[in-house]
Amino acid sequence: MKNVTIKDVAKAANVSYSTVSRALSGSPEISADTRERILQLCKEMNYTANTVARAMVMKSTKLLGLILTDVNNPFMSELAYHIDRQARARGYNIILCNSSRNPDQERELFELMIGRQVDGVMLFPSGPESYETLRPYLDRIPTVFIGENLREVPESYVSVGNYRGAYIGVEYLHSLGHRDILYFGRRRGSTTHQLRAEGYAAACRDLGLVPQYCNNTFPLTSIKYGYQLAKQLFTQKPAYTAIFAATDTNALGIMQAAEERGIRIPEDISLLGFDNIRDSGLPRIDLTTIEQPKKMMASMAVDSLLDKIQSELAGYVHRILTPALIERSSCGPCPKRY
């Protein structure tokens, strides 16, 4: 089937090629009636703009790349949703890719974004090595990192205060009378998880508590792996009255395992999560958690990237958002038997 071109529309409208082009670009050089007539004709003829040609003229594709580590992760999918909304509100569309936490795949996707001539890239890094892997490309395209897998690097990033969020969580559980708090899901190879574990440890030290850990031995964090870890954990006599899960997905896995073992939350064990994913607020879950402000993260990431796109002189900015405690029903006072 032959594609309809601007010349086809011009012939059907009995106007010049340039008049159709002005109508499509919203130029004030033609009348409103002429513009409306041409646009209606474009619709009837199923005309689709040649975005590649337009990009060559305008030197902008109005496309932004977004590379996430795991689109299947609820936090990531919600973040992608907000980024897409924020980008569209500013006249841009998103190309979404999944790196699967694979550095080689991450690099290939970054090269793909450059080849597709996106105006800029937002990246949730696969690990601390991402900066070194991608550094040869960063001068070629404006880039903003999301999350805190990168710390003191001369590139823009937006993240939440993971250390502070974990500290707030321990303080909250302590205020409820808990003195034996288990940190569940500590994972190596992630600065985000490292910072949360450090915040937990610092709060325990300052409050006179003894840190306890249940390490995540799996390569990813998920409901499935949280469930498997919790099943093993619950075979042992608990030396804790509260569990602080490194993520909400871990917490949901813990809830499933606890229900199977007849462990009541919060009557027997209090449970605190981190992220405030959408499912955490469902009635039967009602998880108390530390919130990452995903909508604000998305807005700041898009704004930071557009600043870099629009100004070659724009430097880098490190934006750390403040986490917040979301109180629901999964945490309660320390059981009296302890």
Image (tube, rainbow, N blue to C red):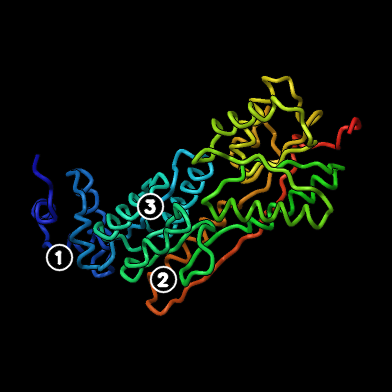
Q: Secondary structure at mark 3?
A: helix
Q: In front: 38, or 291?
A: 291
Q: Nearer the viewer's eye, disc 3 or disc 1?
A: 3
Amino acid type of the residue that numbered disc 3 sits on in the rendered structure: Pro
Q: Secondary structure at mark 2?
A: helix
Q: Nearer the viewer's eye, disc 3 or disc 2?
A: 3
Residue 300 x %, y %:
52, 62
Looking at the picture, does residue 204 appear above or below residue 231?
below
Q: Nearer the viewer's eye, disc 2 or disc 1?
A: 2
- Indicate the quadrant containing the C terminus: top left, top right, bottom left or bottom right: top right
- Of labels 3 and 1, earlier in sequence is 1
Disc number at residue 308? 2
Q: What's the distance in space between the residues labelled 2 and 1, CA to CA? A: 33 Å
- Indicate the quadrant containing the N terminus: top left, top right, bottom left or bottom right: top left
- The residue positioned 74% from the left and 57% from the top of the image is 202
Q: Secondary structure at mark 1?
A: helix
Residue 4 x %, y %:
13, 48
| Residue wearing tag 3 | 103
Amino acid type of the residue that numbered disc 2 sits on in the rendered structure: Lys
Indicate the quadrant where residue 274 lies.
Answer: top right
